[in-house]
């Protein structure tokens, strides 16, 4: 098996990339990267925009926070699907990380506050494309900003995560509403002007179906309009591999997507930076 020159270059320099990305988060409409500076052993919050980046191919467990104190993963375990290894997740969040997607209980077995917390079912709109989802009540708007939605409506409230997940699957199945939208479909939609009137029509149609089938009354749409990006784009962005070198002119950020111009309009997933190592500047 042959390794490309760029990939080999990255592998040779991974240890010299000073920042380990621990979190990608939004505070209102202000995105930031939370990083461990390995050279100075301190936590940094990096505000947008970021380009001129070199990003590692591999990911390692981000450890966890105990209050304001960051605890490094003792083994530095490689990770793929999740940003933590099972051990660090068990110390700080969930003993079974798969419960994020498919809760095993209502909190009566694990006694985890997250699992017992009230959750809501929501309808999210990406312009006129719709999806159904669920989130803990306390962070639903932040969750939708993280996902780059244009608007959302709360459909119902449930006493715990498992009941909300069950309702999500039921509504999705019976009304044929997707639980997710393909990445490339979302990016292609960045070329379309956001049409509030059309979104209201989609919302009213779905809300009526939800009322008739489930007896649930959808709340009015909340529009999310503060993203640091000017849309529509002139052409759909090309989705780039996260690892490697990224240079160019930043055009803005929406949800997890950094949009930039470098011999064409491009996009990279900032959420996929979590667990990776990076350097900012021309010479890592």
Image (spheres, rainbow, N blue to C red):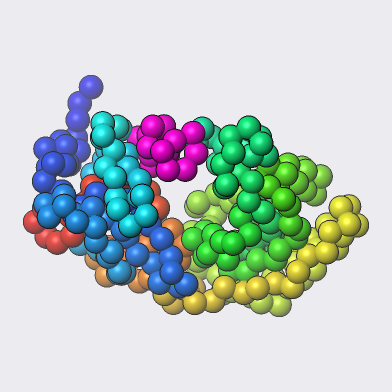
For the question of whether residue 212 can be seen, the reply is yes
Residue at the outermost top position = 1
Magenta span of residues: 79-95
Looking at the image, residue 65 lies above or below residue 257: above
Let me know if residue 91 is in the magenta part.
yes
The image quadrant that residue 88 belongs to is top left
The answer to whether residue 11 is left or right of residue 62 is left
The answer to whether residue 11 is left or right of residue 51 is left
Tell me what residue is drawn at x 62 percent, y 74 percent. 223
The answer to whether residue 7 is left or right of residue 109 is left
For the question of whether residue 246 can be seen, the reply is no
Tell me what residue is drawn at x 59 percent, y 38 percent. 111
Looking at the image, residue 212 lies above or below residue 227: above
In what quadrant of the picture does the N terminus appear?
Answer: top left
Tell me what residue is drawn at x 24 percent, y 49 percent. 20
Tell me what residue is drawn at x 53 percent, y 64 percent. 142
* x then y, percent, for residue 76: 26, 35
* x then y, percent, for residue 132: 68, 53
Let me know if residue 268 is in the magenta part.
no
Using the image as rendered, state which of residue 275 and residue 132 is in the foreground: 275
For the image shown, how many numbered marks are present on the structure? 0
Using the image as rendered, state which of residue 92 and residue 135 is in the foreground: 92
The answer to whether residue 103 is left or right of residue 232 is right
Looking at the image, residue 151 lies above or below residue 210: below
């Amino acid at each position: 098996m042959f390794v490309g020159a760029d990939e080999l270059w990255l592998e040779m320099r991974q240890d010299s990339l000073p920042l380990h990305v621990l979190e990608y988060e939004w505070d209102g409409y202000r995105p930031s990267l939370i990083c461990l500076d390995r050279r100075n052993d301190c936590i940094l919050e990096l505000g947008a925009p970021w380009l001129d980046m070199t990003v590692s191919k591999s990911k390692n467990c981000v450890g966890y926070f105990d209050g304001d104190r960051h605890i490094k993963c003792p083994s530095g375990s490689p990770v793929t699907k999740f940003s933590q290894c099972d051990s660090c997740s068990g110390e700080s969040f969930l003993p079974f990380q798969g419960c994020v997607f498919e809760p095993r209980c209502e909190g009566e077995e694990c006694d985890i506050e997250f699992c017992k917390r009230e959750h809501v079912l929501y309808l999210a709109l990406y312009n006129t494309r719709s999806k159904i989802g669920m989130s803990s009540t306390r962070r639903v708007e932040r969750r939708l900003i993280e996902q780059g939605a244009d608007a959302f409506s709360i459909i119902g409230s449930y006493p715990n995560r498992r009941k909300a997940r069950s309702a999500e699957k039921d509504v999705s199945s019976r009304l044929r509403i997707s639980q997710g939208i393909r990445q490339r479909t979302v990016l292609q939609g960045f070329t379309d002007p956001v049409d509030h009137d059309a979104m209201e029509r989609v919302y009213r149609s779905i809300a009526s179906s939800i009322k008739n089938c489930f007896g649930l009354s959808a709340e009015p749409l909340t529009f999310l309009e503060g993203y640091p990006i000017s849309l529509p784009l002139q052409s759909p962005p090309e989705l780039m591999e996260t690892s490697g070198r990224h240079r160019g002119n930043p055009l803005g950020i929406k949800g997890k997507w950094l949009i930039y111009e470098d011999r064409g309009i491009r996009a990279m997933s900032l959420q996929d930076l979590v667990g990776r190592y990076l350097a900012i500047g021309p010479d890592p």
